[in-house]
Image: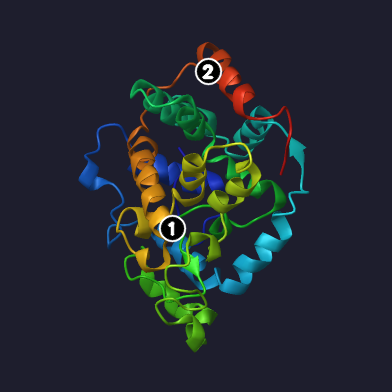
Amino acid sequence: MHVLQNGPLESLEQWDDHVKGRYRADRKKEEFRVYDDSTPPVVKEFYRQNHALQTYEFASGKLAEYVPLHKATMGIWEAMDRLNELVDDSDPDTDLSQIEHNLQTAEAIRAAGHPRWFQLTGFIHDLGKVLTMWGEPQWAVVGDTFPTGCAWSDRIVFSEFFAANPDKAKAEMQTQCGVYEAGAGLGQLKMSWGHDEYLYHVTKDYLPEEAQYMVRYHSWYSAHRERDYEYLMTDHDKEMMEWVRTFNPFDLYSKSDAKPQLSELRPYYNDLINEFFPEKLAW
Protein backbone atom coordinates (compact mmCIF):
# COMPACT_ATOMS: atom_id res chain seq x y z
CA MET A 1 0.00 0.00 0.00
CA HIS A 2 1.17 3.50 -0.78
CA VAL A 3 2.53 5.09 2.40
CA LEU A 4 1.18 8.55 3.22
CA GLN A 5 3.84 11.16 3.76
CA ASN A 6 3.71 14.64 5.20
CA GLY A 7 3.14 17.40 2.68
CA PRO A 8 0.94 17.88 -0.37
CA LEU A 9 -0.85 15.04 -2.10
CA GLU A 10 1.13 14.03 -5.13
CA SER A 11 -1.39 11.71 -6.80
CA LEU A 12 -4.94 10.44 -6.76
CA GLU A 13 -3.46 7.12 -5.60
CA GLN A 14 -2.46 8.75 -2.32
CA TRP A 15 -5.99 10.03 -1.73
CA ASP A 16 -7.64 6.73 -2.62
CA ASP A 17 -5.19 4.77 -0.45
CA HIS A 18 -6.12 7.04 2.45
CA VAL A 19 -9.82 6.55 1.77
CA LYS A 20 -9.47 2.76 1.61
CA GLY A 21 -7.62 2.72 4.91
CA ARG A 22 -10.34 4.79 6.59
CA TYR A 23 -13.12 2.67 5.11
CA ARG A 24 -11.93 -0.84 6.02
CA ALA A 25 -14.68 -3.41 6.37
CA ASP A 26 -14.58 -3.69 10.18
CA ARG A 27 -14.97 0.01 10.92
CA LYS A 28 -17.96 1.23 12.87
CA LYS A 29 -20.03 3.99 11.31
CA GLU A 30 -19.03 6.48 14.00
CA GLU A 31 -15.38 5.97 13.03
CA PHE A 32 -15.93 7.32 9.52
CA ARG A 33 -15.13 10.88 8.53
CA VAL A 34 -13.28 11.81 11.71
CA TYR A 35 -11.39 15.04 11.05
CA ASP A 36 -9.41 16.12 14.07
CA ASP A 37 -5.88 15.92 15.47
CA SER A 38 -5.73 12.25 14.50
CA THR A 39 -6.19 13.02 10.80
CA PRO A 40 -3.02 12.25 8.78
CA PRO A 41 -1.01 15.37 7.87
CA VAL A 42 -1.35 14.58 4.17
CA VAL A 43 -5.13 14.90 4.42
CA LYS A 44 -4.90 18.19 6.29
CA GLU A 45 -2.53 19.47 3.63
CA PHE A 46 -4.97 18.41 0.93
CA TYR A 47 -7.75 20.44 2.54
CA ARG A 48 -5.44 23.37 3.18
CA GLN A 49 -4.86 23.61 -0.57
CA ASN A 50 -8.46 22.87 -1.48
CA HIS A 51 -9.93 25.51 0.82
CA ALA A 52 -7.38 28.17 -0.09
CA LEU A 53 -7.63 27.71 -3.86
CA GLN A 54 -11.27 26.82 -4.59
CA THR A 55 -12.52 30.35 -5.20
CA TYR A 56 -15.66 31.55 -6.98
CA GLU A 57 -13.50 32.69 -9.89
CA PHE A 58 -11.73 29.33 -10.08
CA ALA A 59 -14.98 27.34 -10.05
CA SER A 60 -16.50 29.61 -12.69
CA GLY A 61 -13.43 29.27 -14.87
CA LYS A 62 -13.43 25.48 -14.68
CA LEU A 63 -17.11 25.36 -15.62
CA ALA A 64 -16.37 27.52 -18.65
CA GLU A 65 -13.42 25.31 -19.58
CA TYR A 66 -15.06 21.90 -19.17
CA VAL A 67 -18.80 22.24 -19.61
CA PRO A 68 -18.54 22.57 -23.41
CA LEU A 69 -17.52 18.88 -23.04
CA HIS A 70 -14.89 18.95 -25.76
CA LYS A 71 -12.01 17.23 -23.95
CA ALA A 72 -12.73 13.73 -25.26
CA THR A 73 -15.33 11.36 -26.69
CA MET A 74 -15.49 7.97 -24.96
CA GLY A 75 -17.86 5.40 -23.53
CA ILE A 76 -18.46 4.57 -19.87
CA TRP A 77 -16.21 1.48 -19.86
CA GLU A 78 -13.44 3.37 -21.61
CA ALA A 79 -13.61 6.09 -18.97
CA MET A 80 -13.57 3.47 -16.24
CA ASP A 81 -10.54 1.80 -17.78
CA ARG A 82 -8.74 5.13 -18.15
CA LEU A 83 -9.38 5.95 -14.53
CA ASN A 84 -8.01 2.59 -13.48
CA GLU A 85 -4.82 3.37 -15.35
CA LEU A 86 -4.47 6.51 -13.27
CA VAL A 87 -5.30 4.84 -9.96
CA ASP A 88 -2.83 1.96 -10.09
CA ASP A 89 -3.05 0.21 -6.72
CA SER A 90 0.35 -0.94 -5.50
CA ASP A 91 -1.02 -3.95 -3.58
CA PRO A 92 -3.77 -5.68 -5.60
CA ASP A 93 -4.29 -8.27 -2.86
CA THR A 94 -5.61 -5.71 -0.37
CA ASP A 95 -6.35 -2.50 -2.25
CA LEU A 96 -9.30 -2.04 -4.57
CA SER A 97 -9.28 -0.48 -8.01
CA GLN A 98 -11.76 2.23 -8.96
CA ILE A 99 -13.85 -0.30 -10.91
CA GLU A 100 -13.98 -2.58 -7.86
CA HIS A 101 -15.10 0.24 -5.56
CA ASN A 102 -17.76 1.28 -8.08
CA LEU A 103 -18.93 -2.32 -8.38
CA GLN A 104 -19.08 -2.67 -4.59
CA THR A 105 -21.24 0.44 -4.37
CA ALA A 106 -23.51 -0.67 -7.21
CA GLU A 107 -23.84 -4.23 -5.93
CA ALA A 108 -24.80 -2.98 -2.46
CA ILE A 109 -27.48 -0.82 -4.06
CA ARG A 110 -28.65 -3.76 -6.17
CA ALA A 111 -28.81 -6.06 -3.13
CA ALA A 112 -30.98 -3.50 -1.36
CA GLY A 113 -33.53 -3.75 -4.17
CA HIS A 114 -33.18 -0.26 -5.60
CA PRO A 115 -34.06 0.48 -9.26
CA ARG A 116 -31.71 -0.10 -12.16
CA TRP A 117 -30.99 3.61 -12.63
CA PHE A 118 -29.93 3.76 -8.95
CA GLN A 119 -27.59 0.80 -9.44
CA LEU A 120 -26.06 2.45 -12.50
CA THR A 121 -25.53 5.67 -10.56
CA GLY A 122 -23.56 3.74 -7.95
CA PHE A 123 -21.44 2.22 -10.68
CA ILE A 124 -20.51 5.52 -12.39
CA HIS A 125 -20.58 8.03 -9.52
CA ASP A 126 -16.80 8.54 -9.29
CA LEU A 127 -16.03 8.61 -13.02
CA GLY A 128 -15.52 12.36 -12.90
CA LYS A 129 -12.07 11.64 -11.49
CA VAL A 130 -10.92 11.31 -15.10
CA LEU A 131 -10.27 15.04 -14.66
CA THR A 132 -6.78 13.90 -13.71
CA MET A 133 -6.30 12.92 -17.37
CA TRP A 134 -6.15 16.61 -18.19
CA GLY A 135 -3.73 17.54 -15.45
CA GLU A 136 -6.13 18.79 -12.79
CA PRO A 137 -4.50 18.88 -9.33
CA GLN A 138 -5.94 16.70 -6.57
CA TRP A 139 -7.54 19.62 -4.74
CA ALA A 140 -9.63 20.23 -7.89
CA VAL A 141 -10.75 16.59 -8.30
CA VAL A 142 -11.55 14.89 -4.97
CA GLY A 143 -12.55 15.72 -1.42
CA ASP A 144 -15.66 17.30 0.09
CA THR A 145 -17.40 19.95 -2.03
CA PHE A 146 -19.07 23.24 -1.07
CA PRO A 147 -20.60 26.33 -2.70
CA THR A 148 -18.24 29.13 -3.63
CA GLY A 149 -19.37 32.78 -3.65
CA CYS A 150 -20.96 32.77 -0.19
CA ALA A 151 -19.94 32.35 3.43
CA TRP A 152 -18.50 28.92 4.16
CA SER A 153 -20.27 26.73 6.65
CA ASP A 154 -18.25 25.96 9.76
CA ARG A 155 -19.47 22.38 9.29
CA ILE A 156 -17.22 21.91 6.28
CA VAL A 157 -14.23 19.78 7.25
CA PHE A 158 -11.23 21.91 8.27
CA SER A 159 -13.22 25.09 7.68
CA GLU A 160 -10.46 27.07 9.39
CA PHE A 161 -8.38 26.74 6.22
CA PHE A 162 -10.77 29.06 4.37
CA ALA A 163 -8.95 31.93 6.09
CA ALA A 164 -6.39 31.76 3.26
CA ASN A 165 -9.00 31.88 0.48
CA PRO A 166 -8.95 35.20 -1.45
CA ASP A 167 -12.76 35.32 -1.37
CA LYS A 168 -12.46 35.87 2.38
CA ALA A 169 -11.62 39.52 1.61
CA LYS A 170 -14.69 40.03 -0.61
CA ALA A 171 -17.52 41.28 1.57
CA GLU A 172 -20.18 40.41 -0.98
CA MET A 173 -19.14 36.75 -0.74
CA GLN A 174 -19.07 36.60 3.05
CA THR A 175 -22.76 36.85 3.78
CA GLN A 176 -24.91 33.78 4.28
CA CYS A 177 -26.25 33.88 0.71
CA GLY A 178 -23.34 35.77 -0.86
CA VAL A 179 -23.85 36.36 -4.58
CA TYR A 180 -26.97 34.14 -4.62
CA GLU A 181 -30.63 34.63 -3.82
CA ALA A 182 -32.13 32.91 -0.79
CA GLY A 183 -34.34 29.99 -1.79
CA ALA A 184 -33.59 30.37 -5.49
CA GLY A 185 -32.28 26.82 -5.79
CA LEU A 186 -29.09 24.81 -6.11
CA GLY A 187 -28.93 25.42 -9.86
CA GLN A 188 -27.69 28.96 -9.16
CA LEU A 189 -24.61 27.78 -7.25
CA LYS A 190 -21.01 27.62 -8.40
CA MET A 191 -19.93 24.53 -6.50
CA SER A 192 -16.26 23.95 -5.79
CA TRP A 193 -14.82 22.22 -8.83
CA GLY A 194 -14.29 18.47 -8.76
CA HIS A 195 -15.37 15.09 -10.02
CA ASP A 196 -18.98 15.45 -8.82
CA GLU A 197 -19.74 18.64 -10.74
CA TYR A 198 -17.91 17.46 -13.83
CA LEU A 199 -19.65 14.09 -14.10
CA TYR A 200 -23.03 15.73 -13.55
CA HIS A 201 -22.56 17.75 -16.71
CA VAL A 202 -21.29 14.74 -18.67
CA THR A 203 -24.21 12.46 -17.72
CA LYS A 204 -27.18 14.70 -16.84
CA ASP A 205 -28.98 14.27 -20.17
CA TYR A 206 -29.15 10.50 -19.68
CA LEU A 207 -30.08 10.01 -16.01
CA PRO A 208 -33.23 10.59 -13.94
CA GLU A 209 -33.22 13.75 -11.86
CA GLU A 210 -32.75 11.79 -8.64
CA ALA A 211 -29.54 10.32 -10.07
CA GLN A 212 -28.37 13.75 -11.19
CA TYR A 213 -28.55 15.00 -7.61
CA MET A 214 -26.68 11.93 -6.37
CA VAL A 215 -23.87 12.43 -8.86
CA ARG A 216 -23.62 16.18 -8.36
CA TYR A 217 -23.85 16.40 -4.59
CA HIS A 218 -22.59 13.10 -3.13
CA SER A 219 -19.43 14.82 -1.79
CA TRP A 220 -21.32 17.84 -0.39
CA TYR A 221 -21.37 16.50 3.16
CA SER A 222 -22.12 19.81 4.85
CA ALA A 223 -25.46 19.80 3.01
CA HIS A 224 -26.58 16.18 2.88
CA ARG A 225 -25.11 15.09 6.21
CA GLU A 226 -25.17 18.28 8.27
CA ARG A 227 -28.26 19.72 6.53
CA ASP A 228 -26.60 23.09 6.06
CA TYR A 229 -27.21 25.53 3.19
CA GLU A 230 -30.93 24.76 3.08
CA TYR A 231 -31.55 28.53 2.92
CA LEU A 232 -30.28 28.41 -0.68
CA MET A 233 -32.53 25.50 -1.70
CA THR A 234 -36.00 25.28 -3.12
CA ASP A 235 -38.47 22.84 -1.59
CA HIS A 236 -37.81 20.58 -4.58
CA ASP A 237 -34.05 20.67 -3.89
CA LYS A 238 -34.71 19.59 -0.32
CA GLU A 239 -36.80 16.66 -1.56
CA MET A 240 -34.09 15.63 -4.03
CA MET A 241 -31.38 15.84 -1.38
CA GLU A 242 -33.13 12.97 0.40
CA TRP A 243 -32.04 10.80 -2.54
CA VAL A 244 -28.45 11.89 -1.95
CA ARG A 245 -28.81 10.86 1.69
CA THR A 246 -30.17 7.51 0.56
CA PHE A 247 -27.21 7.03 -1.78
CA ASN A 248 -24.44 8.07 0.62
CA PRO A 249 -24.30 4.97 2.88
CA PHE A 250 -23.83 2.71 -0.14
CA ASP A 251 -20.83 4.78 -1.23
CA LEU A 252 -19.35 5.24 2.23
CA TYR A 253 -19.96 1.91 3.93
CA SER A 254 -19.73 -0.60 1.06
CA LYS A 255 -15.92 -0.41 0.86
CA SER A 256 -14.18 -3.61 1.99
CA ASP A 257 -11.40 -5.97 0.98
CA ALA A 258 -13.90 -8.39 -0.60
CA LYS A 259 -13.40 -7.95 -4.33
CA PRO A 260 -16.35 -8.18 -6.70
CA GLN A 261 -15.83 -10.44 -9.70
CA LEU A 262 -15.72 -8.15 -12.71
CA SER A 263 -15.87 -11.00 -15.23
CA GLU A 264 -19.12 -12.25 -13.70
CA LEU A 265 -20.72 -8.84 -13.24
CA ARG A 266 -19.67 -7.13 -16.46
CA PRO A 267 -22.55 -8.49 -18.60
CA TYR A 268 -25.09 -7.15 -16.10
CA TYR A 269 -23.51 -3.70 -16.02
CA ASN A 270 -23.06 -3.70 -19.79
CA ASP A 271 -26.82 -4.03 -20.03
CA LEU A 272 -27.33 -1.21 -17.53
CA ILE A 273 -24.94 1.09 -19.39
CA ASN A 274 -26.55 0.33 -22.75
CA GLU A 275 -30.00 0.96 -21.32
CA PHE A 276 -29.19 4.53 -20.28
CA PHE A 277 -26.15 5.74 -22.21
CA PRO A 278 -25.12 5.99 -25.85
CA GLU A 279 -22.02 4.16 -27.03
CA LYS A 280 -19.94 7.34 -26.72
CA LEU A 281 -20.34 10.42 -24.53
CA ALA A 282 -18.80 13.89 -24.76
CA TRP A 283 -16.37 14.60 -21.93
Q: Residue at x 28, y 61 (%)?
A: 36
Instruction: From the image, tell me which residue sits under label 1.
Output: 42
The count of marks equals: 2
Q: Position of residue 207 (x, y in %)?
A: 56, 37
In the figure, 116 relative to 268: above or below? Answer: below
Q: Is disc 1 surrounded by few (<14), some (14 to 19) or many (20+) residues within 10 Å?
A: some
Could you tell me which secondary element the residue under label 1 belongs to? helix
- Colouring convention used in this rendered image of the protein: rainbow
Quarter in which the C terminus is drawn: top right
Residue under the point 65% across and 30% down: 277
In front here: 221 or 185?
A: 185
Q: Find the distance from the CA under tag 1 to the CA under tag 2.
A: 32 Å
Would you name the residue on which mark 2 appears?
A: 262
x and y percentages locating residue 182 in the rendered image:
43, 72
Task: Name the residue: 65% across, 44% down.
Answer: 202
Give the residue type at disc 1. Val
Residue 97 visible in the snapshot: no
- Residue 237: image location, x then y, percent: 42, 55
Q: Quadrant of residue 252?
A: top left
